[in-house]
Amino acid sequence: MNSKHKLPATLVLCAGHPTKFYLVSTIDDAADFLFIHWTGNDSIRWLDAMNQCALAAAGTVSVESATSTFVAAIRAAGMRVDPAVLM
């Protein structure tokens, strides 16, 4: 794992039925989560989050920016992010 792709804090996501918990600690984890666990993978928020993850992995945007976009997309999809770990 490339440390420059590490999120500022590990995110704990609550998603699925029954509720499952997922840990996201890198940009790659975030992109994988979006690709594997998001039903319908075609919303604007999903596309924006995937693009931000790709750009952060390439070093074009900051990891913090990609993390914010990722969290906004997760919340828009009705999934929860443990607020205790957010910046």
Image (cartoon, helix red, strand yellow):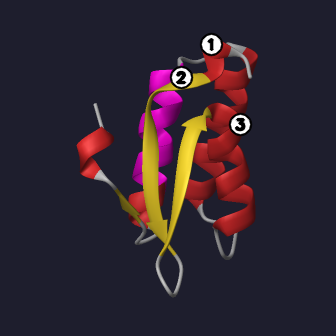
Give amino acid for label 1: Lys
Task: Determine the CA span between mark 1 and mark 2.
Answer: 8 Å
Residue 20 — which label? none
Q: Which residues are magenta?
A: 63-73
The reply to whether discs 3 and 1 touch (Cβ–Cβ < 8 Å) is no
- Across and down, in percent, residue 23 comes to 54, 49
- Across and down, in percent, residue 26 comes to 61, 32
- Across and down, in percent, residue 15 comes to 49, 71
Specify the quadrant that holds the C terminus.
top left
Instruction: Tell me the SS state at disc 3.
Output: helix
- Across and down, in percent, residue 32 comes to 73, 50
- Residue occupying image coordinates x 55% and y 36%: 25
- Sequence-first tag of 1 and 2: 1
Q: Is residue 53 left or right of residue 77?
A: right
With respect to residue 43, does 45 lie above or below?
above
Residue 28 — which label? 3
Q: Residues within 10 Å of mark 1 (few under 14, many from 20)?
A: some
Q: Residues within 10 Å of mark 3 (few under 14, many from 20)?
A: some
Decide whether residue 66 is among the magenta residues: yes
Specify the quadrant that holds the N terminus.
top right
Instruction: Tell me the SS state at disc 2.
Output: helix
- Residue occupying image coordinates x 50% and y 86%: 18
Decide whether residue 74 is among the magenta residues: no
Is residue 52 in sight in this rendering?
yes
Q: Is residue 33 left or right of residue 63?
A: right
- Sequence-first tag of 2 and 3: 3
Give amino acid for label 2: Val
Name the mark nearer the viewer: 2 or 3.
3
With respect to residue 35, does 48 lie above or below?
above
